[in-house]
Each structure stands twice: as C-alpha cells, then as structure tokens.
Image: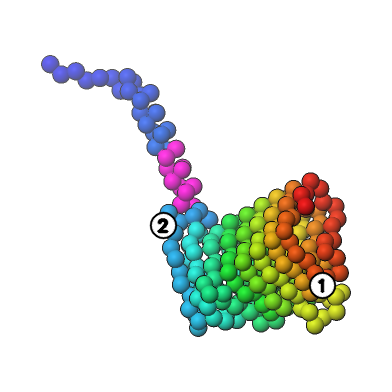
Amino acid sequence: MSITPHACMFAPFFRHVRHAAACAATVLTALSGPGAPSAHAADWRVQPGDSIQAAIQRAAPGDTVRVARGRYVENLRIDKPLNLLGEGRPTVSGGLRGDTLRIAAPDVRVDGFIVTDSGADLGEQNAGIYIQPGAHRARVSHCDFSYTLFGLWIEKANDVVIEHNLITGKRDLDSSQRGNGIQLYNTTGAQILANNISFVRDAIYVDVSHRAVFRGNRMHHSRYGTHYMNSYHNLW
C-alpha cells in the first residue's frame, strides 16, 4: 500500500526554504554588487614608464596598487576603494595643473609618495591631494608634498586620517597667493596627526568641522598656525 502525503502538510516547510534561499541570494548580491571589495584582493605593480592611472582603472575595489620608485607625471583620480602604496618614495607630479591626486571614493589609502606640482589656481582650490565630498575614511600617510598650492583639501569627507606627512607649499609665491597646508571643510571625525607643515598661507584651516583630533603637528613659516572657525568638539 502506498501513502501519498497531502501537499498542504509541507507548505510551511517549503515557504521557509524559499525565504532562506531568497535571503542568501540577497546577501550574495550585496557582497558582489558595485563598489563591494573583491573577495580575493589583487596586487598591481607599476614600474617607471607605466601609467599609475591605468593600473588604478584596472584594479578592482579592495585591490592594492604598488608603485616603484620613479617619476610619474600624471593627474590621478581614485574612484574606488583601494590602496595606493609607494615603494622607495616614487614621485607623482601634477605637471603644474589641477590636483595632483583626487580621491573620489570612500576607503582609499595613499601611503609613501612624493606629491608635487599641483596647479596654482586658488579659485579651483588646486591641491596635492583633494579629498572630495563622500570620500569618507580616506587615509593619507608618510607622503611628502612639495610645491603644491593646497597640500590637502578635505571637503565633506568624514573620519579621514592624515598622519606623518611633510607639506611644503609654493614658497616662491607671496603668502596671500599660497593655499593652506591642510584644509578641512564640513567634516566630522578627522584625525590630523604628526604632520610637518611650512611655507603655506595657513598651516591648518578648519571650518565647519567637528569632533576632530589634532595632535603632534609642527607648523612654521605660515600666516597662522591654525585658522579656526565655526567648529566644535575638537581636541587639540
């Protein structure tokens, strides 16, 4: 004798399975969607004569681009989360135009470069590194900024870390024609640590920026050590 169970007996079980499968598919889609870090982060190597920007474009979110010692004349743009690491202190020159490097994505790390030769347009806020709105959690460390108008311009980007950098402005310009060493505008949670800043207009310019930490910075040959406005709950 055979027994055929009624389908209704298993309806709750099938509904549960379908729901679990749908949830799993949603999680996998979120992890592999646009902007998600690569499951297997790759290293990309750049040698003198290669293009750093080309390597950045090939890299996936979460990858690391390692740049060998040399001189690279490029205006770089990082538009995905990745690590840009200099080995042997390579030089990136902006060719005296625009920003030498622009960070346009969250979770970007830049470490170990000589960043030089930005443009000199105060209206365009040309900088060695411009961290644009939404580029949260950017980290810039162990870089030398040489002959840049603004060293770093940081706008509407939260929880950035700027540490152990040497920033020297366009010292042949009059003080009023130089940019600031580090400019913070409309930010929250920045950490500005152990930077050496000189020959700029104002070493650190802080406007509408809150809950930041400023510690161990050395500032000289500037109009103001710090130009500070409209900012609250910061630690010096």
Residue in the foreground of this view, choosing between 168 and 44: 168
Q: Which mark is residue 40?
A: 2
Which of the 4 image quadrants contains residue 38? bottom left
Residue 32 in the magenta stretch? The answer is yes
Region in magenta? 23-34
114 w.r.t. 78: above or below: below
Residue 99 in the magenta stretch? The answer is no
Q: Is residue 28 left or right of residue 183?
A: left
Q: How many marks?
A: 2
- Residue 2 location (% of width, % of height): 15, 19
Identify which amino acid the numbered label 2 is placed on: His
Residue at 69% over, 76% down: 146
Residue at 72% over, 78% down: 147
Nearer the observer: mark 1 or 2; the answer is 1
Q: Which mark is residue 221?
A: 1
Q: Are marks 1 and 2 in contact (CB under 8 Å)?
A: no
Which of the 4 image quadrants contains residue 75? bottom right
Q: Which mark is residue 45?
A: none
13 w.r.t. 125: above or below: above
- SS of the residue under disc 2: loop
